[in-house]
Image (tube, rainbow, N blue to C red):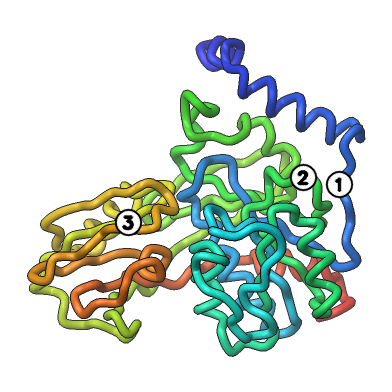
Amino acid sequence: MWQSIINAINPYFYIVTLRNLLYDLGAFKAKKVPVPVVSVGNLSCGGTGKTSVVRFLAEKLSQDTSLLILSRGYRRRSKGFKWVLKEGRGLTDIFVAGDEPYLLAKLFEGNQRVSIAVCENRYEGAMQALKEITPNLIILDDGFQHRSLYRDLDLVLIKRKDLSDRLLPFGRLREPKGSLKRAHALILAYQEIYPFEFSLENKPVFKMHRKNFRLLNHELKPFDSFKDVEFIALSALGDNEQFFNTLERLGIKLKGRLSFPDHWDYKGFTPKEDEFYLTTLKDFVKLKPSPNIFVLDFEVDVPGLEEFVKNVIFRSACF
């Protein structure tokens, strides 16, 4: 009842609903590109692990085929189409790319089967990229709301908090939960700290777990001597509390927390020389490397997702 009342006074609800209705009725057309497209998206404003799942899929699928990761490049200081990584070769900096595409480029640098590009208009970005490279697959990063590019597979991440959240501006949801009906499969995120169950209309459901957590130093090498260190945790994520809670769960000692807005550029931030800081890879690439700044890294496992994507997208054509 209360949700219906809130939606009734929320103009954003009507804008989003009308836009989706126009796509559903065919008044707005999604444009196709000549290669399969897999979208990795969510409902809420960040913090569901999209980048981690994109990384997971790119690592797995690039073992057998070439692919392009296509992103908007949120809050980048550039416009239009830009290459970030072209067939394993890095071509730009974080300001042109945006933090998440740049992070992915650093992780996949040297892998000739992976390319990364950014463009506000994903269809135009895809077509521009296809003039120069010939990937067998496009992974659309944060693409659930970007309906102008046709996708063959819509993967939508959900975290437990989303199920009780509200639509913007009263909550952090970018679309009503009813929009999940157009997803092809659901991924329940952060099962290792927030286990939950959810299903919808017999859609395939996968569970994302993070594992093999490790701390890296400023050279991104393993840092094993941290048990007696007290860190100041800092992050600029869609959900900073999730990062802090993960550190506590891992038994890492914290003496402070610095929470910044999502995608914050750390302009003007100067770490104290006598403190130890711990952050995420996404934040680390925006910070000047320093011996007292450390990084939490981990592996992601989504059992069954790789096989599902291959079966749906490629059938027997490429694999």
Judge whether 157 appears above or below 99 on screen: above
Decide: few, some or many residues near mark 2? Use Cα within 10 Å; few <14, some 14-19, many ≥20.
Answer: some
Looking at the rendering, which quadrant does residue 178 occupy?
top right
Considering the numbered disc 3 on the image, is that residue within a helix, a strand or a loop? strand
Q: Classify residue 168 as left or right of residue 175.
A: left
Q: Which residue is mark 3?
A: 235
Q: Which residue is mark 2?
A: 147
Q: Are marks 1 and 3 in contact (CB under 8 Å)?
A: no
Mark 2 belongs to which amino acid?
Arg
Instruction: Give the percent coordinates (x, y) of residue 209.
Output: 46, 62
Q: Residue at x 57, y 66 (%)?
A: 97
Q: Label 2, label 1: how many angstroms apart (C-alpha)? A: 6 Å
Q: How many marks?
A: 3
Q: Residue at x 69, y 28 (%)?
A: 16
Q: Is residue 52 visible?
A: no
Judge whether 18 appears above or below 24 on screen: above
Considering the numbered disc 1 on the image, is that residue within a helix, a strand or a loop? loop
Mark 1 belongs to which amino acid?
Ala
Q: Classify residue 72 as left or right of residue 293.
A: right
Q: Which residue is mark 1?
A: 30
